[in-house]
Every structure is written in C-alpha cells, then in structure tokens.
Amino acid sequence: MAELLVFKNDDPGFRSWVRGHPGGLVVNVPNLMVHRPDCDHISDLMTKAAKACADGPNAATELRLWAQEEKGKRLLICETCEA
C-alpha cells in the first residue's frame, strides 16, 4: 500500500517530498489532475491549494481511490507528463 500524504499550506514539506520521491505521483487537488513530481506544471506550485502525493507500486491506485472517496470524482491525467 502506498503512503498517501496531503500537503496544505506546507510548501517546504511538499517540496521536500517532491525531491525525495522522483517516482511518485502528485495530484493538484482543486482540479484533481495527476502529475509526475518532475512535471513543469507542479514544479513551482504552492500548497495553498492542497496536493495529494503518493509513491510506490500502488500509488496510482491509492490516489484514484482517495479521489473517489474524498472528492467523489475521477482523476485527470496530465497530458504533459502523462502520469
């Protein structure tokens, strides 16, 4: 099971997670779009709007389940990084 973390108003924590999890996935919560940590769309984003992050072999599944359970919606896939 992937460890899912949500960062809200924690820019240093989010940036640290991104640097330490290059194979993880990041969901920009307002639009529920999933990105790779190195995607240009999230490199400078702040956590005023929450970011859900997960790493590991089940990261995509965990984030999909989280989005459905917490937000009642499906994730969108970033066309730039094709996460």
Image (tube, rainbow, N blue to C red):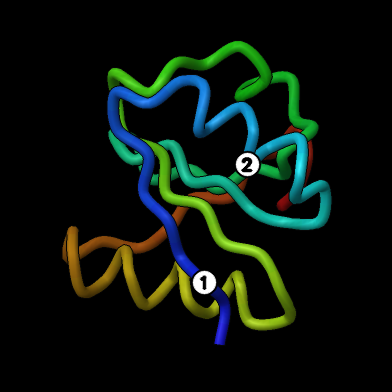
The location of residue 49, given as percent across then percent down, is 29, 25
- Position of 47 with respect to 21 (left or right) is left
Q: Say which residue label 1 marks.
A: 3
Measured along the vertical axis of the image, is residue 52 above or below residue 13? below
Give the residue displayed 52% in from the left and 71% down from the top. 3
**Crowd around label 2: few <14 · some 14–19 · many ≥20 (10 Å):** some
In the depicted view, which residue is nearer to us: 13 or 60? 13
Q: Say which residue label 2 marks.
A: 17
The location of residue 24, given as percent across then percent down, is 71, 56
User: Judging from the image, what secondary structure is the residue with disc 2 in?
Assistant: helix
In the depicted view, which residue is nearer to us: 73 or 69? 69
Give the residue displayed 72% in from the left and 44% down from the top. 36
In the picture, the disc for residue 49 is none
**Quadrant where the N terminus is found in the figure:** bottom right
The location of residue 75, given as percent across then percent down, is 43, 57
Give the residue displayed 82% in from the left and 47% down from the top. 22
The location of residue 13, given as percent across then percent down, is 50, 32
Residue 37's quadrant in the figure?
A: top right
**Crowd around label 1: few <14 · some 14–19 · many ≥20 (10 Å):** few
Q: Earlier in the sequence, mark 2 or mark 1?
A: 1
Give the residue displayed 29% in from the left and 18% down from the top. 48
The three-letter code of the residue at mark 1 reads: Glu
User: Pointer 2 and pointer 1: residues touching (CB < 8 Å)?
Assistant: no
Return the residue found at the far bottom: 1
The three-letter code of the residue at mark 2 reads: Trp
Q: How far is disc 2 from disc 1 in space, using C-alphas?
A: 12 Å
User: Judging from the image, what secondary structure is the residue with disc 1 in?
Assistant: loop
In the depicted view, which residue is nearer to us: 77 or 29? 29
